[in-house]
Amino acid sequence: MFENLSDRLSTTIKKLKGQARLTDENIKDAMREVRMALLEADVALPVVRTFIDKVKQRAVGEEVLNSLSPGQVLVKIVNDELVDIMGQANETLELNAQPPAVILMAGLQGAGKTTTAGKLAKLLKEREKKSVAMVSCDVYRPAAIKQLETLANQVDVTFIQSEIGQTPVDIAKHALDFAKKKHIDVLLVDTAGRLHVDAEMMDEIKAIHNAVTPVETLFIVDAMTGQDAANTAKAFGDALPLTGVVLTKADGDARGGAALSVREITGKPIKFIGIGEKIDELEPFHPDRMASRILGMGDVLSLVEEAQRKVDHKDAQKLAKKLNKGKGFDLEDLRSQMLTMKKMGGMGGLMDKMPGMGKMSQAMQDGAGDKEVDRMVAIINSMTPQERRFPAVIKGSRKKRIAAGSGLQIQDVNRLLKQHKQMSKMMKKFKGGGLKKMMRGMKGQMPPGMGGGGGFPGM
């Protein structure tokens, strides 16, 4: 997401190199480029105008400090205005209500409402420690009810049955009574979508809203519809008291215009963003972190939070102790690291959040990096436990057997062994606090405001 916009902005900022200060002339040129970049990203025209005016107002005559270049000053201003346009800070769900707290899911057909309901149920259960129930009011599509039931089973939350003969309002009322009796914390109500906004649809969802009085009414919108996403959100917002927006399919849109338009046009905060198809790929939307990614500075905070959730800390401590004792980094350890990386969104997901790695992430997201990881894991899986622990024993005939077992070539096995050898040498440096030294060194190279002073946990 935002690859094109990031590229255009970085090119614009590079052009300011060598300038002594920001002037009317160079700001005018830079703003022309930024305007084109935003329009190409499918940001709504009124939002582009407001944004450009604000940046220009702040940038003209801005004093350039000795420690900063005009390009860096512009980055700071653009960053601040991007954060402002997307909503300053993450706005969480308001769940402090008499249980069950009802969350109503609204949106057009195909926007990803049902999938998002499943993702949200998982997030609430695992991160917020809430008991969750789900119900579908989509009596027009039996497949939608079945899909929600499948998702409820997958994330292990309660599914409340609804029948085709019931009205959507009856289903919602029955679900609310059920959730009250079972002392469930959160009830997610999935509603029917249409291919376009129509009066019948709005009347139905208003009736459901009145029947269950939700604490949160979330509008689910496909990020790939660009500025149309913001216009549809506004139509729903005029009919319903929306409390927030969830952007879905953000991984499929390189432009990102919806993220920059929705808040400004609707006045409603983006609360979550869907970053992939997997059930755990729904993240709270942080405007400051998103702005940082747009400007190619990565998103280290989200990376750290993801690591805290998805890394097996017992395994990590075991590996640290093993390395500190001077024991080798074997192929079992390498496989474990590869699988952890896949859990965290693969090579593309990691690179996208690393400072300065935005352009690399596109190549990775195209699959090259993840395919290589899959090949490495397949090769290690074809080895015996002894071979994984003592790679030095892997010679001619063993290499042939491992290659055949993984469906790859002997050259691939040789490449893996060579990579492991290099990693093993690097891991030896971690003995006696080497890892901390390396992380401290990395902190010094972080962009301003991205951990340069705060540092990594435990460092």
Image (cartoon, helix red, strand yellow):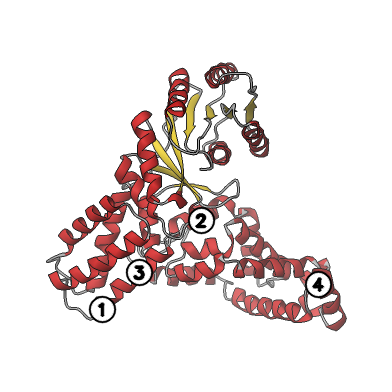
- Measured Cα–Cα span from mark 1 to mark 3: 15 Å
Q: Quadrant of residue 52?
A: bottom left
Q: Nearer the viewer, residue 69 or 14?
A: 14
- Measured Cα–Cα span from mark 2 to mark 3: 19 Å
Q: Nearer the viewer, residue 114 or 354?
A: 114
Name the kind of residue labelled 4 in the image: Glu
Q: Which labelled disc corresponds to residue 387?
A: 4
Q: List x then y, in percent, for residue 450.
A: 37, 62
Query: In the rendered view of the protein, which quadrant contains the N terminus?
Result: bottom left
Name the kind of residue labelled 3 in the image: Arg
Mark whose residue sits in front, 4 or 1: 1
- Decide which of tag 4 and tag 2 comes sooner along the chain: 2
Name the kind of residue labelled 1 in the image: Lys
| In this view, 6 is above or below 256 | below
Mark whose residue sits in front, 4 or 2: 2
Asked whether the viewer can see residue 450, the reply is no
- Indicate the secondary structure of the residue bearing disc 1: loop
Q: Which residue appears at 42% of the width and 59% of the height? A: 255
Residue wearing tag 3? 8
- Indicate the secondary structure of the residue bearing disc 2: helix
